[in-house]
Amino acid sequence: MDMERIQPSDALLVVDVQNDFCPGGALAVPEGDAVVPLINKITGLFPTVVATQDWHPEGHISFASRHPGKNPFEVVEIRGTEQVLWPDHCVEGTPGADFHPGLNTTAFRFVLRKGTNLEMDSYSAFLENDRRTTTGLAGLLRELGVQRVFLSGLATDVCVRATALDGRAAGFQVVLLEDACRPVDVPPGNLAGALRQMLDTGVRAFLAEELQV
Ligand code: VGL
Ligand code: ZN
């Protein structure tokens, strides 16, 4: 098995490992909770760990309930950008927005909340969905001397994908920890396209067990 050595300039991102994205949650990702033990195993290997939380105000623009006559998973156009409508999820301060209770958060140096703007969604941990408004993450990582970002969490084909692509665009090396992520795969086939797109932009893929200090 190929092993990949963790460097002082590496960071781990733990994307949206929250109750609402786990089985029983409002926007459950199949086997979403399966990433928890793997992530717990590797957080201690990294000098810097940043966790994100999807963190929406009530009545958020991405909620189908905000759009009369629309159902979850329909797509609408909002000010020129396509928006998938989701069930209400990760409402700020609710149990659904909490980290999964099994997730060991002690190694998290930073927690970044995204999607906090009532009128704009943010899949990526770097840029909001207008593709202009920054979350500040790139600046934070650069300030810390981070050059390579490892990605884990939920969901592979939504927020992890967007974070991977924006991480590349911001000049970071990006590694997808494939087994430490799970996809929603809506619509079916979305995952395959997401993986292709990530690999095409220079994202490398590893398994969590291939990491070593
Ligand atoms: C996500 C859908 C809506 C995610 C967030 O974290 O992948 N997916 N909001
Ligand atoms: Zn969301």
Image (cartoon, rainbow, N blue to C red):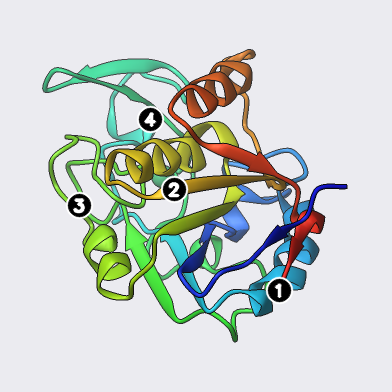
Identify the residue position indicated by label 2 in the image: 173
Q: Say which of marks 1 and 4 sits in front.
A: 1
> Residues under labels 2 and 3: Cα distance?
28 Å
Where does residue 145 sit, x and y in percent of width and height?
Answer: 33, 71
Q: Is residue 99 above or below residue 34?
A: below
Callout 2 touching callout 1 (CB < 8 Å): no
- Residue at image point 88% right, 47% down: 1
Q: Does residue 48 appear anywhere in the picture?
A: yes
Which secondary structure lies at badge 2? strand
Decide if residue 186 is in sight here: no
Q: Are marks 2 and 3 in contact (CB under 8 Å)?
A: no
* Residue that badge 1 annotates: 213
Most foreground residue, 54 or 109 = 109
Q: Indicate the secondary structure of the residue bearing disc 3.
A: loop
Q: Residues within 10 Å of mark 2 (few under 14, many from 20)?
A: some
Distance of label 1 from label 4 (alpha carbons): 44 Å
Image location of residue 95, percent across then percent down: 54, 68
Looking at the rendered structure, the secondary structure element under dot 1 is loop
Given the image, on which type of amino acid does mark 4 rest? Ala
The amino acid pointed to by label 3 is: Asn
Looking at numbered disc 2 in the image, what kind of residue is underneath it? Answer: Gln
Residue with the mark numbered 3: 117
Q: Mark 1: few, some, or many residues within 10 Å (few <14, many ≥20)? A: few
